[in-house]
Amino acid sequence: MAGPPRSFNTPVHRRHLPAILAVLGARPADALSKDEQLVTSLFERVTPGVVSIAKEAPPPGDSTGAKPSAGLAGSGFVWDNRHVVTNYNVINEMQTPYVTFLLNDKSGNKRLTFLAQVVGYDTSSNVAVLEVQNQDNSSLPKGLMQPLERGHSDKLMVGQNVFAFGNPFGLEHSLSRGIISGVSRKMEGSGGRPISGVIQTDASINPGNSGGPLLNSDGEVIGVNTAILSGSGMFAGVGLAVPIDTVSKNVESIISKGFVKRPLLGLIFAPDVMDQELQLNGIMVMKVIPGGPAENAGVRPMRGGRLGDVVVAMDGQNISSTDDLFGLLESRAPGDTVKLKLQRPNADLDSDELQEIEVPIKLGQATDK
């Protein structure tokens, strides 16, 4: 007759446990799946290129960044051997931002903080460029500036894995994983000018993530985390990132010129809801900037209770909203000539007929200097 069953604590069972786990398809607790290995490898590779940005230097004592940082404003990432890129809203009103790096050496993780100078910014795309400096103007430590690889955002697909890096709630160097939930979204930028091609993701983005990179599975930056859609101000499953193609174009302009050149019509339009209520075929001009390109071309604003000119097309492409117009302007440059098709109220106040005319306008230049 068989004796009592042996406990798994006996040497016999302990010796055979790996074989039993293999048969059952289990793996030791400290083993990582291939997918997990890829993610942890990506985190280790990217972390030195992700920074935290604050209004003041972090307090001494926490050299690893493991504790929440109270004065943290947001995140950023290394662009080249001198510059860091972040959101404009992160550094807005900062005279001298402090940039903190987390580097790994033989003694473990080391936290290094440096002053930075604001090189320039573009409020319309919410992008800012900082130059990292040593206080005594000496060279930066070797290996400090580790630029992240940059991808492209024009061929992204819904369902792609993405990784959001940053410092949510002051918890430095955090990683969240998700997918691309939508592409070609639009988000209102400064002055009502929309940002096109915005990336929607369900990767967790919270206060403090702003300005951090959104990466693909290859570790390439495809966007800059910039906003969340939430009624509470906390993450609710919808995060938004400015596409890297837009960021790259504007950052290079800021680095070379100190600002971003944008085409300017010199017009202020009525809200889209007003155009819809009036059942207009396009967007109505409320104001014309004095001395601007549109005034010089003879465009008429709303005045004395009379409707202003209604822009219905630009260069043969129909316009039904301000988003349409600004989207078309993104592919133009200052100095280009565009043709606006306008519907103009009749001189006869008793007539509802609109006169259709075409007006050439040489675009001016708008900048954030």
Image (cartoon, grey):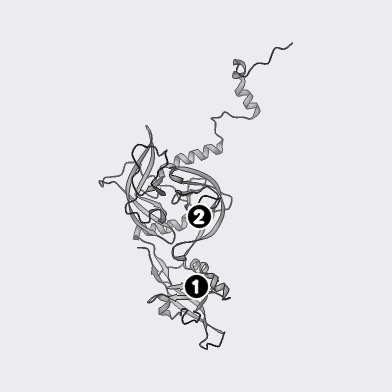
Quadrant housing the N terminus: top right
Rounded to the nearest angstrom, the CA distance separating label 2 from label 1 is: 32 Å
Q: Nearer the viewer, residue 186 or 68?
A: 68
Disc 2 versus disc 1: nearer the observer: 1
The amino acid sitting under disc 1 is Ala
Q: Measured along the vertical axis of the image, is residue 185 above or below residue 61?
A: below
- Residue 150 visible in the picture: yes
Q: Is residue 7 left or right of residue 213?
A: right
Residue at 35% x, 36% y: name it: 61
Q: Mark 2 highlights which residue? A: 153
Q: Secondary structure at mark 2?
A: loop
Residue at point 52%, 68% (across, down)? 324
Q: Residue at x 43, y 81 (%)?
A: 298
Residue 312 lies left or right of residue 55; in this view the side is right
Percent of width and height locating residue 229: 53, 55
**Percent position of residue 68, x then y:** 42, 41
Secondary structure of residue under mark 1:
loop
Residue 52, horizontal then vertical, whole percent? 40, 46
Residue 307 place in picture, x, y as percent: 51, 80
Residue drawn at 50 percent across, 72 percent down:
270
- Tell me: 261 left or right of 157: left
Mark 1 = which residue? 270
- Front residue (pair 28, 280): 280
Q: Is residue 318 visible?
A: no
**Closest to the observer: 293 or 216?**
293
Quadrant the C terminus occupies: bottom left
The label shown at residue 192 is none
